[in-house]
Image (spheres, rainbow, N blue to C red):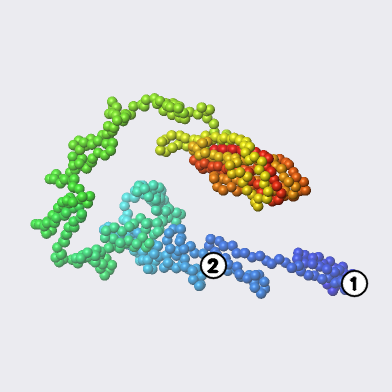
Amino acid sequence: MAKCCTSPGCKCVVQAGPGVTVDGNGSTGTPYVISSDAAEPTALQATDTPTVDMTVTGTGTAADPFQVSADVILDPTPPGGGDNLIQSGPEGLSLECADVRGCFSAGDGAGYDPDTGVITARPSTDAGNTVSYGTDGGLFAPAADAAEPTALEAADSSSVDTEVTGTGTAADPFVVTSSVILAPNPPGGGDQLIQSGPNGLSLECADVRGCFSAGDGAGYDPDTGVITARVSGDAGNQTSIGSDGGLFTPAGGAAEPTALEVTDSDTVDLTLTGDGTAASPFSVSADVKLNPAPPGGGDNLIQSGPDGLSLECADVRGCFSAGDGAGYDPDTGVITARPSTDAGNGLSYGTDGGLLVPSAAALTVGCGLQGDGTAAAPLAAFPIAGEQPWADDWDCDAAANSTLKCDPDSGALWTPPEHTSASVTIQQNHPLGTPVFGPTGGFLIVDTTAWSEGAYTADSLSTCRGISFSTEFTGHVEATWTAGSVFDLGYGVSIDGGPPAVRVMHSRLQAGDVAGHERWSFETAEATVLAAHTSHSVRVYPAINVVSGSVTLNQWITDTHLIAITR
């Protein structure tokens, strides 16, 4: 920059790139200042694959750099069902020859040593075989003597498709090509285990090991494919495993006599005779055991005779008997239906021997019913006004609020008793005369023989329902009083014959300087709810309380209003 910025104005151009900021014009007074923008932290994530497990640690700074490590994933359960042969150790992955040698074994024409992995050709030991090993270790078959021209034809078999080309001369030798035929649908119905590929046929250990299992005298390990002879552990067995690993039974010597025993079961009694020699061979006979006391406590019905076991119909007929609605003949075993002989039973036998119930006669219906009980006209209630949904008139639950019910004892339908009501008004002019009252010292009954009463006699309105009963008493009083009089008028109320309790109805509370003469009207009421079969009475007596002065009662009339309504 010193070479291009020697003049007062710098002609060098400095351009900021991504993440860089340039300030100044390059002069001595305002030099270029280049600074970098703070970049966002680098984001680093690890993504695993089916074969590699990735791990990321660190924050990506100089003090704590990212560290990426990877571990190979080894399948613990390979898809072929065998063991995973690949090993993982501190030095890395490994798969040695010894790990795979157990997967192979020798078949026809081959020899195999699983300890060394050496595979060899195995010539047949059959008489006339000319195949042997040459001096170089290869298979050797000596050339045939000169003879007539060799005729060579291809003959296919069910398992090999053979093709011959050439004439058999040195210039045009025979070329025999064979292709193995693999049945797509093996006759046993299983899968074809042999595989054909570009490198030949293949059949692996794991492919065939599931085809075998151990029977009598053999042992088999399906995981390794090892088949062994299994020597019986029974006493007296002379066979064992020899020093060379083969089965060994010592020659000669008198063998122990054959031992034979018989074992009875719960149902068969076995008998053994003879000693197993040619002169007295073993003879085993069997007799079926019949339980003389069966667990159910009855007789054993099975019979044993010279021709074998038997159980006839007659033997079991005594096991059955007839219950309600059935008939039974133990001599023939015939089971029948048994109609009741009770009066009114319409069940009988039809002409075909089956049970018959004749069609019911038309019903005679009474009041409130319709129909004759047939499918065309079923028996039903007869509403005179026809049918109508409950919800058309009532916004409530029908089962909880309908009043039509059935008496479980009589079977009769019923609804609550009808409601009724009564009311009456009685006017009574109390025969008091014109009594005069000075100060009384409190309320007193004007005349105990002058009263009005509202009463209800039990069951007079309804013999079933309770009663809402109310009484209202309206008093009309004419009185005169002297100057300075203060007084109260009221009713003494007696309920069901109880002592009167005074209710104040009208009062003159201010003493005046002049006498007076007036008429007043006032009323009181009493209401109650009565249970069924209950009487009730309310009686009122004119009452007066004179505090000062003198009061004359000229007239006292009581209007009595009675209202009774059933509940």
Name the residue rendered at 40%, 25% in the picture. 364
Q: Is residue 520 left or right of residue 175?
A: right
Residue that label 2 marks: 71
Question: Taking 472 as reference, is 90 above or below it?
Answer: below
Name the residue rendered at 52%, 41% in the picture. 535
- Quick one: 218 or 320, which is closer to the camera? 320
Question: Taking 218 as reference, is 182 above or below it?
Answer: above
Q: Is residue 490 left or right of residue 127?
A: right
Circle on res. 7: 1
- The reply to whether residue 283 is visible in this rendering is yes
Name the residue rendered at 66%, 74% in the picture. 63
Q: Which image quadrant: the C terminus?
A: top right
Name the residue rendered at 20%, 40% in the picture. 317
Identity, as a three-letter code, of the amino acid under mark 2: Asp
x and y percentages locating residue 32 in the rendered image: 83, 70
Q: Which image quadrant: the N terminus?
A: bottom right
